[in-house]
Image (cartoon, grey):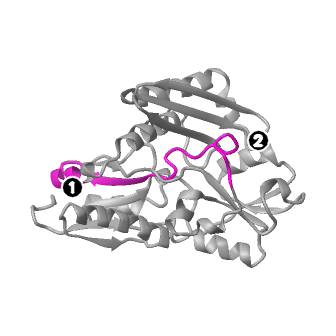
Amino acid sequence: MGVMRHQTVIIGTRGSPLALVQAHQVLRHLETLGVSARLHIIRTSGDRGHRGGVGVFVKELEEALLRGEVHLAVHSLKDMPTQQPPGLRVACVLERADPRDALVSRLGPLEHLPPHARVGCGSPRRIAQLRAIRPDLDYLPISGNVDTRLRKLESGQYDAVVLAMAGLARLQLEGRTTQVFSLAQVLPAPGQGAIALEVREGDARALRLAQDLNHWPTWWSVLAERAFLRALGGGCRVPIASYAQVQGNRLTLDGLVITPDGQTALRGQVEGRPEEAEALGTAIAQRLLAQGAGHLLGARV
């Protein structure tokens, strides 16, 4: 089912507060183009508590796209697998928000936390990099949306939690941050801070509308990051990190593979033209694999 010329565009989104903020951002962008649009909320397996596997926050949105129930699906790009199902494509990314990770703490910044302080963190990538800085802390699993995690912190279940700065900013919770980690301390997940729009192949109007919203510096950056992740065979549940940025006609990509205990890491950087984004991501992955990254990815705590 393609989008007819004057048909209202139906935007598929999860129902979490952060997902709705992101979907409303897309809605406002479309309205500035004179396009009528509305949101359609879809509950994913990740929302129902099934956190294992890849794409748990994406699958049901993609199924709705393929059935023609929605014309666009809004995703946090870092939640998306590096390969889309047949018949679907990532059509655009919006301008990226702050890609860094942040600490929200009851006991001060990371360096001031007492030994064995309980740090809530659901990401192996974050935990591994934080262990490299503070191996004496207790890193505990945490689940739920941003508000839920902050309530768990306030209730005393944790002494600190680690969250994406982009999510805090979109929810206007920047004031809650105790510390924002530098990119040298904690390199982000591929695609972190970027909102992606996914469409059906062949839906010409949906594709055109999405591409009208594309932010090209962010597009080239996340293309390189996701190519790095794909070449390493990883997903969002393994300790792989990357961050690219475009300045003028140059793209710089940093990539990191680290053991879960944070004790051994391989990090590299590559630079080239933005149009070479995917080749650059693949090249740095191959370089790290030649240095033993595959062995690091198989390591356990």
Q: Amino acid at mark 1?
A: Ala
Mark 1 vs mark 2: which is more N-terminal?
A: 1
For the N terminus, give its image quadrant: bottom left
Q: Residue furthest toward the left?
A: 5
Residue underneath mark 1: 206
For mark 1, give the secondary structure.
Answer: helix
Magenta part of the protein: which range? 180-209
Whether residue 24 appears in this view of the structure is yes
The residue drawn where x is 81% and y is 63% is 118
43 or 169: which is nearer to us? Answer: 169
Using residue 74 as the reference point, say whether residue 169 is left or right of it. right
For the C terminus, give its image quadrant: top right
Whether residue 68 appears in this view of the structure is no
Using residue 171 as the reference point, say whether residue 240 is left or right of it. right
The residue drawn where x is 45% and y is 50% is 96
Q: Residues within 10 Å of mark 2 (few under 14, many from 20)?
A: many
Numbered badge on residue 130: none
The residue drawn where x is 54% and y is 50% is 99
Against 158, is 91 above or below?
Answer: above
Residue underneath mark 2: 262
The residue drawn where x is 20% and y is 60% is 33
Q: Amino acid at mark 2?
A: Gly
Q: Position of residue 125 (x, y in %)?
A: 65, 47
Q: Residues within 10 Å of mark 1 (few under 14, many from 20)?
A: many
Against 143, is 179 above or below?
Answer: above
